Image (tube, grey):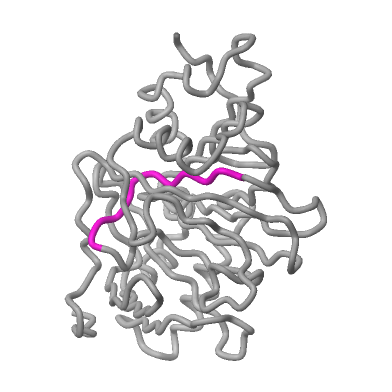
């Protein structure tokens, strides 16, 4: 079967949408050719599969993701259950916002694909959208002087949580590991007084200190501009597959105790990308 030219997710400037209503009658997700879907994600950077029968459980989701490639395993297994905890030790298990970042920045290998399956969606007025920013487009559209400033900056990121205690160092503007296209690797700072659980330790170097505010303000504005950013409003059963090599992503805050429950799986590229930003334990240099 050949997949027809997909639509684009509502209100998105990038990405592709395949709705079960436009597929062949009775067709299930497993019948869509993975090779074609993989190329859609690489071309459009985001793929929304909507209206297909939901995965029965985490094991069924894992089995489907394994068809795409090698799964990046965590101490807890393949699937991260993203839902609010009663007493969260980290912001990913809280209901507040999560800044833009890329996945795998603190781990030995960086996944190419992120799978987000919505087990239960929050109410339409309860927030919790997942924000994606298309960084290659941000760079294409930037004024030369602005982009030149971004290209001078290197970020050093230190983060300790249950699953790692790591340091990552990366130029803000770097190259896509397969195509060589310029992309942005950036962890958006949060204000020190923000109600944010388990702040990472961030440092940005390469330009005079008095230009860092200009750098952050301009980059944040560009990353979140409507033409570059898409906020996905979840519906129960949605499966979103994202190009982690190109996009940054984050989360809107949502109403505490809202029924927001996502499952996330990471799938590695072929070959797997060894993390160029990761520094050995105890190495906090930014060189």
Comparing 26 with 134, the one in front is: 26
Q: How many discs mark residues in the rendered view?
A: 0
Span of residues in magenta: 108-118
| Vertical arrangement, residue 106 with respect to residue 240, above or below | below
Is 113 inside the magenta-drawn segment? yes
Residue 226 drawn at (x, y percent): 64, 52
- Name above or below for residue 265 compared with residue 88: above
> In this rendering, would 22 be left or right of 197?
right
Name the chief secondary structure element in magenta: strand
Which residue is most to the right?
125
Q: Is residue 97 above or below residue 56?
A: below
Q: Position of residue 175 (x, y in %)?
A: 27, 53
In the foreground, 91 or 223: 91
In x, y percent, where is residue 178? 24, 43
Which quadrant is home to the C terminus? bottom left
The residue sitting at 56% across, 23% down in the picture is 6
Image quadrant in which you'd find residue 154? bottom left
Q: Residue at x 61, y 78 (%)?
A: 87
* Residue that appears at 61% across and 90% down: 193
- Residue 58 in the magenta stretch? The answer is no
* Quarter of the figure with the N terminus: top left
Left or right, residue 282 beside residue 241: left
Left or right: 196, with 126 as reference point: left
Q: Quadrant of residue 187?
A: bottom left
């Amino acid at each position: 079967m050949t997949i027809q030219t997909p639509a684009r997710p509502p209100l998105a400037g990038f990405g592709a949408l395949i709705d079960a209503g436009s597929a062949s009658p009775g067709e299930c997700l497993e019948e869509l050719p993975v090779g074609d879907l993989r190329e859609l994600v690489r071309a459009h950077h985001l793929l929304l599969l909507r209206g297909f029968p939901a995965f029965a459980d985490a094991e069924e989701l894992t089995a489907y993701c394994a068809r795409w490639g090698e799964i990046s395993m965590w101490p807890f297994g393949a699937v991260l259950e993203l839902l609010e905890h009663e007493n969260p030790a980290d912001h990913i298990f809280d209901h507040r916002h999560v800044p833009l970042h890329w996945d795998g920045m603190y781990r030995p290998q960086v996944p190419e694909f992120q799978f987000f399956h919505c087990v239960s969606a929050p109410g339409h007025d309860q927030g919790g959208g997942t924000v994606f920013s298309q960084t290659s487009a941000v760079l294409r559209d930037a004024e030369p002087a602005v982009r030149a400033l971004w290209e001078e900056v290197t970020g050093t990121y230190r983060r300790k949580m249950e699953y790692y205690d790591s340091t990552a160092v990366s130029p803000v503007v770097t190259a896509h590991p397969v195509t060589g296209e310029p992309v942005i690797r950036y962890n958006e700072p949060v204000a020190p007084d923000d109600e944010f659980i388990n702040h990472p330790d961030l440092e940005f170097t390469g330009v005079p200190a008095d230009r860092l505010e200009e750098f952050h303000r301009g980059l944040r504005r560009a990353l979140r501009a409507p033409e570059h950013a898409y906020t996905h409003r979840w519906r129960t059963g949605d499966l979103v597959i994202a190009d982690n090599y190109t996009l940054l992503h984050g989360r809107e805050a949502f109403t505490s105790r809202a029924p927001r429950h996502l499952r996330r799986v990471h799938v590695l590229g072929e070959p797997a990308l060894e993390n160029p930003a990761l520094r050995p334990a105890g190495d906090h240099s930014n060189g």
